[in-house]
Image (cartoon, rainbow, N blue to C red):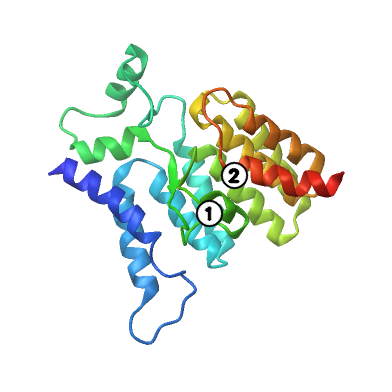
Amino acid sequence: MDACKYYYGIISQYAAQYLPPPTTKSKTYNIKKFYHKHLQDGFRTDAVSGWLLYASYYYVTGQYSVTLRLTEYVLSRCKHDMVHVDRDNRKEENINNYRRKVHSKTSLNDRIKLATVDLVTYMWHSSLIPGELQLEVENQPFCIPPTVLSYCLRFLFHHHLGNMLNRQQALHNLHLIVRDDYSISLDDLSESETILGVCHEISGNKISACQFYDKAMHNNVKVCRSSKARKSTPCVAET
């Protein structure tokens, strides 16, 4: 039964992203009601990915302060002893971390929500992805580590408010996460560097943006498909 809840949560996360845009006005049905139902069901998959999709929902609907609060919550959950769903977790350290976090009588679904974190998956043409990242889902789904997306959303929040000091701090934190954080695997590095490039481009630093797009393009493990398209635009303009 708990396994069914987990997979239902994944399906709910995907289903929410294929709804009409959350700003759509309809006389026949309540779009927001469907979003909230699917997104709340999406909390069942792990400790953070569902919350970040909810943060994205509030971002695309212009409720930026809620987005900020949700990212603060997510960052408080992304501790180094959390188990990463997208990794090989057969290492003894990971197994011990998991055991420390959960009680033997805890249900499987509660264990998942207490002790695991997963990538945030934006589906193809997702209705929940920030407008600044639409290119990333133009031709395929896009997966982002939760810490990277959290600081990206915080950067975008402060950018919209015109708070340059906090925007720069969020960008600095994003730099540190991409450079030093163990939670970003080599499989996710190209996407993370692309996100960092986007934030630099938004802040007006096209040279740094192109450098990160170039790094993303030359990852030996996995290459973010949108990095090439991203690089061609600002770098041509810069030259």
Residue positioned most to the top: 92
Residue 88 % position (x, y): 35, 21
Question: In front: 37, or 114?
Answer: 37
Tag 1: amino acid? Glu
**Secondary structure type for disc 2:** helix
Residue depicted at x 35% and y 33%:
116
Tell me: 76 left or right of 17. right
Residue positioned most to the left: 1
> Does residue 88 sit above or below 38 in this rendering?
above
* Quadrant of the image occupied by residue 105: top left
Residue depicted at x 52% and y 48%:
71
- Residue under label 1: 138
Residue 22 % position (x, y): 46, 70
Tell me: 205 left or right of 221. right
> Does residue 19 sit above or below 76 in this rendering?
below
Q: Quadrant of the N terminus?
A: top left
**Secondary structure type for disc 1:** loop
Residue 119 % position (x, y): 43, 39
Q: Quadrant of the C terminus?
A: top right
Tell me: 213 left or right of 182. right
Question: In front: 95, or 4?
Answer: 4
Answer whether labels 2 and 1 touch (C-beta < 8 Å): yes
Asked if residue 205 shows in the view, the reply is no
Residue 26 % position (x, y): 41, 83
Tag 2: amino acid? Ser
Disc nearer the start of the sequence (2/1): 1
- Residue under label 2: 226
Pointer 1 local density, CA inside 10 Å: few below 14, some 14–19, many at least 20: some
